[in-house]
């Protein structure tokens, strides 16, 4: 191709912007010269991508595009106008199935169907989790997506059995973890002391943090054995949020003022921790990378939690909700999701995990089995190779 390859990329969440930026950094070695435009976030823009619209600052935490419907519709209109001015050679979309596949109930046509109508090939990176729920989305994927780039090992066989071209490329988290290094001095300081160290990972999203951290504190207040505790903050803004939650949450007198907030020290904290209380999501794989015993917690709130108990168990096709247990296809780590009815129950499990050496060693060995297949290769390079293949065959 004499001119540069025209890539249109679409992200609607901050995490997708991170993964898309990694993809662009890997692209020159595989794709040569290219230009990029799309629905971008700040990281893509920093790499030179042209922004048609930005949804990352307004991403809805639950319900996908529903919380930002008006912005999403405006963005989709801007996308089509951009394609009319200059047709891209390939569309690469990341996650966000409501935006990218559409919502038939709302007659919202997603970006992938719009691209298909124009003859633009589509690569979908980070597959919708239809193996867990909403399997009817597979029909839309089959119609509109040329190749699905999967980040979980079992997804390739699942989608291929449903006549969808799918390839496992690896998990993007482990690209960044390969570069992550604990600070020896910080690890040594955190390990000093006789009492075990409990790490709290309450989530990076504001809404999740405000629901999960008070639950984690309630668990700590019910532990029977002495412990030390530190909580991880991804940046200074989240550290301020955490400080506010700590100040506002009921805590036993012995606990108040003893919890250390660490900013941008995940690697050191996880290296030093004896037990991790972690919000559900990708963070569980981060903990598993360090082979640390963990308890997964989440609080969807009474409304969504009740809805899950009534409807969700009929819809969700897996008995496990945490990523680690999903990948293992068995209960490797304790999970309390989507709600925590009784913090005392979690505390009892935590006490046992801190004292039962055999259980700890078994969990560590099982975590190693889960994450080892994810720690090889480059997901970003794999997606770029898919893009090259799709462009060359369409």
Image (cartoon, rainbow, N blue to C red):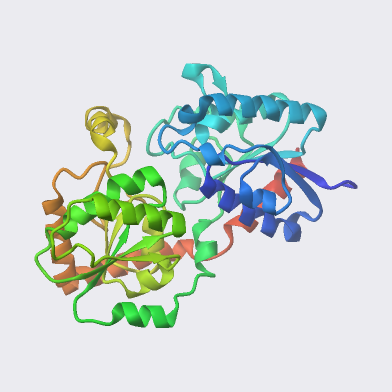
Task: Reply above or below: 197 against 25.
Answer: below
The percent coordinates of residue 17 (x first, y second) are: 58, 48
Task: Reply above or below: 123 against 356.
Answer: above
Q: Nearer the viewer, residue 197 or 172?
A: 197
Q: Nearer the viewer, residue 154 or 26?
A: 26
The percent coordinates of residue 361 (x first, y second) are: 24, 72
Please state if 283 lies on the left or on the right of 216 as rendered. right
- For the point 13% across and 47% down, which residue is it? 342
Answer whether residue 202 is visible to the viewer in this image.
no
- For the point 52% across and 49% down, which residue is it? 15
Please state if 131 lies on the left or on the right of 304 as rendered. right
The percent coordinates of residue 20 (x first, y second) are: 61, 50
Answer whether residue 247 is visible to the viewer in this image.
yes
- Quarter of the C terminus within the rendering: top right
Residue furthest out toward the right? 2
- For the point 52% across and 69% down, which residue is it? 178
Q: On the image, which quarter does residue 264 sit in?
A: bottom left
The percent coordinates of residue 134 (x first, y second) are: 41, 30
Q: On the image, which quarter does residue 70 sit in?
A: top right
């Amino acid at each position: 191709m004499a001119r540069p390859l025209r890539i249109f990329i679409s992200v609607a969440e901050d995490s997708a912007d991170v993964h898309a930026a990694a993809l662009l950094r890997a692209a020159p070695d595989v794709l040569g010269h290219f230009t990029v435009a799309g629905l971008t976030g700040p990281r893509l823009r920093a790499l030179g991508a042209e922004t048609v619209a930005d949804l990352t600052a307004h991403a809805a935490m639950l319900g996908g595009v529903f919380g930002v419907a008006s912005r999403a519709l405006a963005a989709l209109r801007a996308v089509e106008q951009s394609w009319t001015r200059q047709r891209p050679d390939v569309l690469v979309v990341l996650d966000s199935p409501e935006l990218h596949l559409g919502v038939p109930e709302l007659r919202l046509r997603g970006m992938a169907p719009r691209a298909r109508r124009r003859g633009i090939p589509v690569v979908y990176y980070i597959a919708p989790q239809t193996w867990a729920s909403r399997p009817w989305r597979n029909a839309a994927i089959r119609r509109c997506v040329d190749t699905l780039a999967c980040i979980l090992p079992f997804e390739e066989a699942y989608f291929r059995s449903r006549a969808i071209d799918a390839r496992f490329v690896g998990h993007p988290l482990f690209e960044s973890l390969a570069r992550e290094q604990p600070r020896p001095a910080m690890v040594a300081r955190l390990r000093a002391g006789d009492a075990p160290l409990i790490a709290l990972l309450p989530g990076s999203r504001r809404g999740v943090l405000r629901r999960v951290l008070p639950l984690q504190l309630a668990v700590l207040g019910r532990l029977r054995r002495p412990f030390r505790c530190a909580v991880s903050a991804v940046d200074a803004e989240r550290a301020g949020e955490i400080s506010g939650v700590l100040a506002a949450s009921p805590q036993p007198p012995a606990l108040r003022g003893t919890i250390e907030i660490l900013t941008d020290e995940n690697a050191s904290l996880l290296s030093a921790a004896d037990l991790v209380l972690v919000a559900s999501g990708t963070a569980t794989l981060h903990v598993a990378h360090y082979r640390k015993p963990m308890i997964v917690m989440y609080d969807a709130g009474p409304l969504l939690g009740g809805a899950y108990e009534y409807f969700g168990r009929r819809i969700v096709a897996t008995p496990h909700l945490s990523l680690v247990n999903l990948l293992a296809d068995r209960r490797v780590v304790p999970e309390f999701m989507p709600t925590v009815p009784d913090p005392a129950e979690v505390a009892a499990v935590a006490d046992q995990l801190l004292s039962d050496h055999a259980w700890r060693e078994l969990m560590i060995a099982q975590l190693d089995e889960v994450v080892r297949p994810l720690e090889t290769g480059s997901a970003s390079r794999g997606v770029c190779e898919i893009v090259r293949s799709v462009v060359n065959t369409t």
